[in-house]
Image (spheres, rainbow, N blue to C red):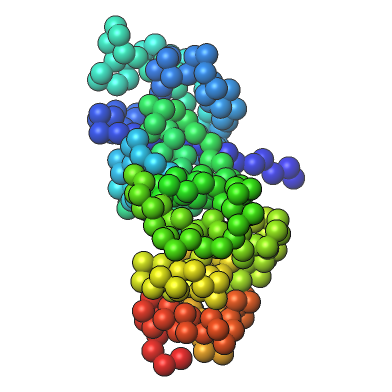
Amino acid sequence: MEVTAVTTAYVYVGVKGSRNLDTGIRKSVWGWKPDVIVGTDYHPVLQSLKEGDRLCLGHLGLGRIQASEAQSRTVPTLVVARLTGGLYQDAEKVWDDEDGKTSYPYRVPLEIEETRYDVTSDDIGPEGIEALRMSAIRNGTPELPGSRESVMERVLEEVLEEYGGEPLDEEDPEDSANLDLPSALDVPSYTLARREQKIVRARKLDGRTEVPCDLCQLLLPKRLVHTAHIKRRSRSLHHERRDLNNVMFACVLGCDSLFEHGYVYVASDGSIRPSDAVRASADLSTAVGRVGTRCLAYSDASAPYFAWHRENIANVKGR
């Protein structure tokens, strides 16, 4: 028996589309204006959708914001619909705001499967949130989600730009020539740029293009691995920020965030353990389960930094 793959497309509905969303749900249809579809890349996307595919209509919560900010947002309502047919054109009025100037003739028939509330990236993945964000930016276009890795790379690039940095896999030749840290680590920019970050990373990489994550131990391209401070940089003293024993490799596939927010910690024997906060969520336990059992960055020299993280971020005392 042949199994047909199901495609899921995302559409963002803003404040002005609230009444149209109610109408679309009631009449089991969704539509787009000609200028959003005709002559654009989205016509082929709609033409590719078929009966049985999914259309997720996200209502509010995002808008024209950066990818990094969107990942921390909550979408109040997500209507999940199954298509009962493919794309068709119809000029019959469906929505109240359709008149001589406004119409939504490019339509898909649908059947509402469920309505979910307070949806985050934990529920639909970073790629789902990013698809809704792009749909918001492009006036409600149908968006197919990209890969999780590409989304997290975009988030990483935005964070680096915010701090006046550059992509971490593009070392400046001048930095490679002189890896001595400057005496002043913060320099004026639109924000305080982390001047030592590229140099510390270059010293830690030591010319390698692939490095193992110190938590899950996967060997990954360097662009997928953060050089993360063990003791938070904002709480570190000047010399601690420059100490290579206070940095480790943590991948963007989940390990960096799990450690950063204290869902995992490194015990005094170098083992990696889940914090008490993980017990409340089966899905979070599954995510933590892919992390390794021992931290590659643990040593006598790094132990005090892991102890700080354990006590102050993971809220674990005496372990």
User: Which one is in front, 255 or 57?
Assistant: 255
Let me know if residue 198 appears in the view.
yes
- As drawn, which residue projects farthest toward the bottom? 318
Query: Taking 125 as reference, is 52 above or below it?
Result: above
Say whether residue 143 is left or right of residue 97: right
Q: Position of residue 213 (x, y in %)?
A: 62, 67
User: Which one is in front, 147 or 58?
Assistant: 147
Say which residue appears at 55% left-offset and 47% top-offset. 167
Say which residue appears at 42% left-offset and 33% top-offset. 135
Quadrant, the N terminus: top right
Say which residue appears at 41% left-offset and 93% top-offset. 318
User: Which one is in front, 208 or 260?
Assistant: 208
Query: Taking 12 as reference, is 205 above or below it?
Result: below
Query: Taking 236 as reference, is 90 above or below it?
Result: above
Residue 272 in which image quadrant: bottom right
Say which residue appears at 47% left-offset and 30% top-offset. 142
Q: Position of residue 249 (x, y in %)?
A: 58, 66
- As drawn, which residue projects farthest toward the right? 1
Say whether residue 259 is left or right of residue 203: left
User: Which one is in front, 148 or 250?
Assistant: 250
- Number of numbered discs overlaid on the protein picture: 0
Say whether residue 138 is left or right of residue 221: left
- As drawn, which residue projects farthest toward the top? 100
Q: Position of residue 264 (x, y in %)?
A: 48, 75
Q: Position of residue 229 (x, y in %)?
A: 48, 68
Let me know if residue 232 appears in the view.
no
Residue 253 in which image quadrant: bottom right
